[in-house]
Image (cartoon, rainbow, N blue to C red):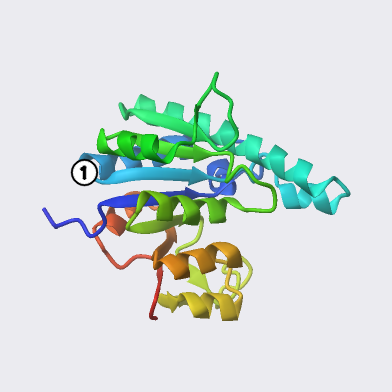
């Protein structure tokens, strides 16, 4: 078997990705597909951490734009990520994968509080760990959570699971002539304002030299291809 390129990964899932073709809610078909793909990489010995967004249920920025207090709106968004995390945990456990959810906001009846050493211990025991409730702070996105947790657990890469094949120079959903980048540097992402992740998260990845792979999660087997180092999607690193 081909040698693994990445031994420990952070899989960043957007809430919108969980909605599938719908604009709202959780698609059981998408959950099942993601769980099966995670099982593929678990079976070859990869340590997997998942950070999931909540945009399929609630977006804090959208709430604040309508006059809601920004901190309150963001806390609501954090709770939405917990709902998604529990759904994902259930899907993974149906695949026979031992899974733990850790939340940045304590809610002990349904999940563990986030403790870095405990999360690493779960990984050492072969469990998948899902980080929910963002960083526990308003004004920070789940992209920033993914970058922060990746640094804390010393992940090899962040896999940004999207509905599109990679990073494009314009929206491929609206422009059929949009061109996809194969490689980018962190500085190019920041300077060009590309929608890989927000600037705070990108800067954190740059400072800690955490590479990113942006790819289409709806193509079966893509997560496994990514950990094997196959050229799928767009790679973001120190040099382009």
Residue 212 in sight in this render: yes
Q: Which residue has dot 1 on it?
A: 45
Q: In the rendered view, would you say 159 is above or below 53?
A: below
Q: Which residue does the image show at 58% across and 25% down from the upper left?
A: 107
Report x, y in % for residue 236: 42, 71
The quarter of the picture where residue 36 lies is top left
Side (left or right) of 15 relative to 90 = right
The quarter of the picture where residue 5 lies is bottom left
Report x, y in % for residue 71: 76, 45
Report x, y in % for residue 135: 58, 46
Residue 198 in sight in this render: no
Q: Which residue does the image show at 11% across and 53% down from the upper left?
A: 1
- In this view, which residue lies farthest toward the left? 1
The quarter of the picture where residue 82 lies is top right
Label 1 packing within 10 angstroms: few (<14), some (14-19), many (20+): few
Q: Which residue does the image show at 44% across and 26% down from the upper left?
A: 90
Q: Which residue does the image show at 85% across and 45% down from the upper left?
A: 68
């Amino acid at each position: 078997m081909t040698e693994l390129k990445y031994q420990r990964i952070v899989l960043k899932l957007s809430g919108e990705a969980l909605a599938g073709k719908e604009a709202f809610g959780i698609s059981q078909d998408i959950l099942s597909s993601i769980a099966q793909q995670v099982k593929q990489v678990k079976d070859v010995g990869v340590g997997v951490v998942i950070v999931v967004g909540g945009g399929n249920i609630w977006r804090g920025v959208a709430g604040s734009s309508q006059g809601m207090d920004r901190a309150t709106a963001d806390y609501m968004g954090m709770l939405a990520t917990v709902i998604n995390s529990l759904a994902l945990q259930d899907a993974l456990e149906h695949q026979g994968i031992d899974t733990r959810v850790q939340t940045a906001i304590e809610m002990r009846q349904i999940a563990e509080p986030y403790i870095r050493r405990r999360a690493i211990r779960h990984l050492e025991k072969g469990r998948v760990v899902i980080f929910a409730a963002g960083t526990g702070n308003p004004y920070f996105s789940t992209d920033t959570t993914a970058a922060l947790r990746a640094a804390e657990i010393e992940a090899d890469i962040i896999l940004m699971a999207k509905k599109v094949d990679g990073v494009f120079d314009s929206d491929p959903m609206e422009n059929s002539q949009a061109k996809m980048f194969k490689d980018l540097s962190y500085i190019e992402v920041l300077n060009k304002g590309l929608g890989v992740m927000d600037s705070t998260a990108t800067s954190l990845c740059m400072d800690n030299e955490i590479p990113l792979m942006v790819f289409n999660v709806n193509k079966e087997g893509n997560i496994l291809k990514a950990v094997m180092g196959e050229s799928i999607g767009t790679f973001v690193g120190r040099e382009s």
